[in-house]
Amino acid sequence: MLIAYLFCLLAGVVLISLSLDNDGGFDGEGGHLSLLFSTPFWSFGLTGFGLCGALMLLLSPGGSWLPPSLVALAMGLLMGWAATKILRLIGRQDVDSLVRSDDLVGREGQVSLAIEAGGRGFVELSARGSLIRRPSRSSDGRALPKGTRIVVVAADTNTLSVEPLENPF
């Protein structure tokens, strides 16, 4: 049992050292060799190897010129490499669902609280999957009743400037 513990200790030290970046700090990505020691590589690689090998044995005719183990090994390596690269790429993407005032310009919405002539009201519109309700003014100063379809033409920190989609004249 001691040999098993020592083997695990040595394998852990090797995996950790390969995951260190050039400055000696831990980098989640590591170098090129750390690809071979990543969990996604082995889990997808072993799955691809097993599935491809089993399917080739079951579905290919006997005496095939290409050994199933060679194809399964290639498929396992390819699937492991691809899964690791894709997961790293996805991990680097920034998710940004924050709605800024500039994101609202050009969006269509609806007046939810009537905008009086020269005054403010409220509009509702959708942006980045969220329903936004903001104070607004008519860009030309006229009144807009509740339910009027509008488009945002300008936005500052607190108030949207809107115009009706259909000209009532």
Image (cartoon, rainbow, N blue to C red):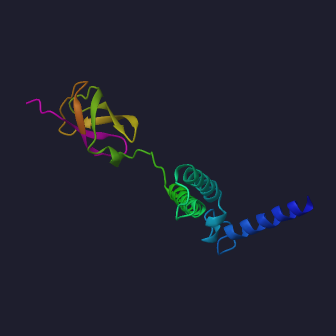
Q: Quadrant of residue 98?
A: top left
Q: Is residue 40 magenta?
A: no
Query: Can residue 60 be seen from the camera position used here?
Result: yes
Q: Quadrant of residue 13?
A: bottom right
Magenta stretch, residue numbers: 152-169
Q: Is residue 154 magenta?
A: yes
Residue situated in front as seen by the camera: 70 or 157? 70
Q: Position of residue 137 (x, y in %)?
A: 26, 36
Q: Position of residue 153 (x, y in %)?
A: 24, 44
Left or right of 41 on screen, residue 121 = left
- Residue beneath the point at 77% across and 65% down: 11
- Residue beneath the point at 57% across and 49% down: 58
Residue situated in front as seen by the camera: 154 or 99? 99
Q: Position of residue 95 (x, y in %)?
A: 48, 50
Question: Relative to 97, is 30 above or below?
Answer: below
Give the position of the C terminus as an image quadrant: top left
Left or right of 42 on screen, residue 117 = left
Q: Quadrant of residue 146?
A: top left
The mark total stands at 0
Query: Can residue 25 be seen from the camera position used here?
Result: no
- Residue beneath the point at 51% across and 55% down: 90
